[in-house]
Image (cartoon, grey):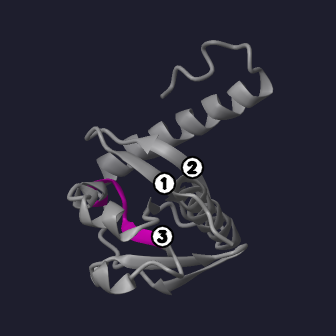
Amino acid sequence: MDLSLPERTAAVRREAARLCRQLGWAPLHEVALPNGRRADILALKKDGDFACIEVKSVASDFLSDAKWPEYREFSDAFYFAVDGDFPQALLPPEVGLIVTAWQDAAVLREAPVHRMASGRRRALTHRFAMLAACRLEGMIDPLDRFALSCE
């Protein structure tokens, strides 16, 4: 099946989020971080740790992205999520790797753990909860113009 670039990116994101849920993680898409970056997926794990997942759908997207190390300071584990056609040899070995396929995904390489400081974790947990609650409220009441003000 040939997918356009936006469709391919959406498929990788969707399957990575499904994998998060299968692992018992709570994924949240497009999370603005305090350093101005935006995580493709920030997942709260069962133990309270955060996993940041950066979606890459084509090699040129990765090769032009020099900012990915800046996501690590706001997660305990950092992963790239790619599909099976992505040239995995391009990805740095010091991060986790999720590979997706049609309605499937797997962690091929666990991310090394680099724990955040407790104050940063507390602030990020609060940000995560507020954002998730506001997005849910926006779904329940789409006319509430304040529901998305947490972003």
The residue at 51%/25% (across/down) is 150
Which one is earlier in the sequence, the residue at label 2 or at label 1? 2
Q: Is residue 51 above or below residue 96?
A: above
Question: Which residues are the magenta region?
Answer: 72-81
Query: Which amino acid, by three-letter code, is at mark 3?
Result: Ala
Q: Nearer the viewer, residue 81 or 113?
A: 81
Q: Is residue 126 above or below residue 95?
A: above
Q: Residues within 10 Å of mark 1 (few under 14, many from 20)?
A: many
Q: Which mark is residue 42?
A: 1
Q: Position of residue 142 (x, y in %)?
A: 74, 20
Q: Give the label, 2 or 3, closer to the camera.
A: 3
Can you identify the residue that label 3 sits on? 81
Picture quadrant of residue 113: bottom left
Which one is earlier in the sequence, the residue at label 2 or at label 3? 2
SS for callout 2: strand
Q: Residues within 10 Å of mark 2 (few under 14, many from 20)?
A: many
Quarter containing the N terminus: bottom right
Can you identify the residue that label 2 sits on? 28
Q: What is the distance, in whole Å, between disc 2 and disc 1 at their CAs? A: 5 Å
